[in-house]
Image (tube, rainbow, N blue to C red):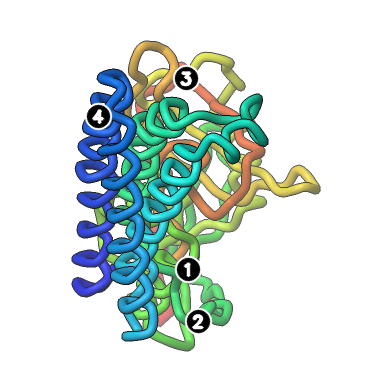
Amino acid sequence: MDQSRAAAGLVAVCVLGIGGPFAALAFLWLEVRRRFREARALSGSLALVLVLGSTGSYFAGQTPEIWGPSAVLASVCATAFVLHFSIVRKAIRWFASPTAVWGLLLVAAPASATLLAWGLNQPDDCPITPAPLLIEREEIPQFHVVTDAGRRLPVYTLVLAESATEFEHAFIAERHFACRVIRTGDPDPSHNCHGWVFTQGRFALRPEDVEDILADNHYEKVAEPQPGDLIIYRNVEGQIEHTGLVRSVIAGEIVLIESKWGPLGRFLHAPEDQPYGTDYAYYRSARSGHLVTILEEPQSP
């Protein structure tokens, strides 16, 4: 959020969060003391001042954060003013009273200020939606990984048509991940999420080969995750899309995942705060660690 908008938002928070309750308490005191003439005159005067101020701000091109709170308070003051006339009260006696209006303001103003303050902390929309990042896999024939059952699987590096860093910046902003993830590693096209987990970031692996690793290395699905477990995300067809590691589990409910997002960076995030969907499960193996054996083939002369 830019600084001018943030400053305007802080003005709005102060007007609603401080000015609203102060005015409410002052008018409630006048009503309880049955000083109706003073309350009527003061509420009418305050409504007029606030209307003029908010109208002037609106026509001066100010943002809604500037003129909006004054307009809200002006409408409340005007409502209390007209309710001091008996003819109005008789018409809507069942509907409202000045005391009820100020009581409502006493609750509504701090609540509105809280919501506005929360909105100030939300990330701005990204001006453009980034086009899909073009990724190709390039096999590295002199290397293979080997599962515990002896199955040999190919390894790859990722080839990009553009900068992963620039794409990641736009992608994080567009998906509103900025306030929900913590970066732990920079973009690196040498490996993907599967390669980060199973080859310690040396290579990229195909998603379909992860199924073989899970089977050959005796992974089993578990309901209650523990630090060190795998988390596997699948698409609607049930195919593996993404792999990560469980880093912490707090009170058996709050789970923190670390994973690498394709050729992009590596992030700490909640299980649902990632771009791979909500179909995920946890896996555990009795083996020590997740790394597979890397076999280097002698190159032909």
N-terminal of the pair, mark 4 or mark 2, is 4
Q: Nearer the viewer, mark 4 or mark 3?
A: 4
Verify CB contact (< 8 Å) between mark 1 and mark 3: no
Residue at 40% over, 60% down: 71
Q: Which residue is mark 4?
A: 25
The percent coordinates of residue 66 (x first, y second) are: 30, 67
- SS type, badge 3: loop
The residue nearer to you, when weighing 234 against 124, is 124
- Quadrant for the C terminus in the image: bottom left
- Residue 199 visible, this orientation: no
The numbered mark at residue 225 is: 3
Q: Secondary structure at mark 4?
A: helix
- Marks 4 and 3, Cα distance to the nearest angstrom? 52 Å
Single out the mark in the foreground, 1 or 3. Answer: 1
From what the image shows, is residue 122 above or below residue 282? below
Cβ atoms under marks 2 and 1 closer than 8 Å = yes
Three-letter code for the amino acid on which mark 4 is drawn: Leu
Q: Position of residue 217 (x, y in %)?
A: 54, 29
Viewer-closest of 130 and 118: 118
Q: Earlier in the sequence, mark 4 or mark 1?
A: 4
Q: Nearer the viewer, mark 3 or mark 2?
A: 2
Dot 1 corresponds to which residue? 174
In the displayed structure image, the side of residue 228 where residue 96 appears, left or right: right
Q: Amino acid at mark 1?
A: Glu
- Rounded to the nearest whole Å, what is the CA distance between mark 2 and mark 1? 7 Å
Callout 4 touching callout 2 (CB < 8 Å): no
Dot 3 or dot 2: first in sequence order is: 2
Q: Alpha-carbon neighbours of circle 3 within 10 Å: few (<14), some, or many (≥20)? A: many
**Label 2 crowd (10 A; few <14 / some 14-19 / many >=20):** few
Q: Is residue 231 above or below residue 125?
A: above
Check disc 2 and report the residue beneath it.
128
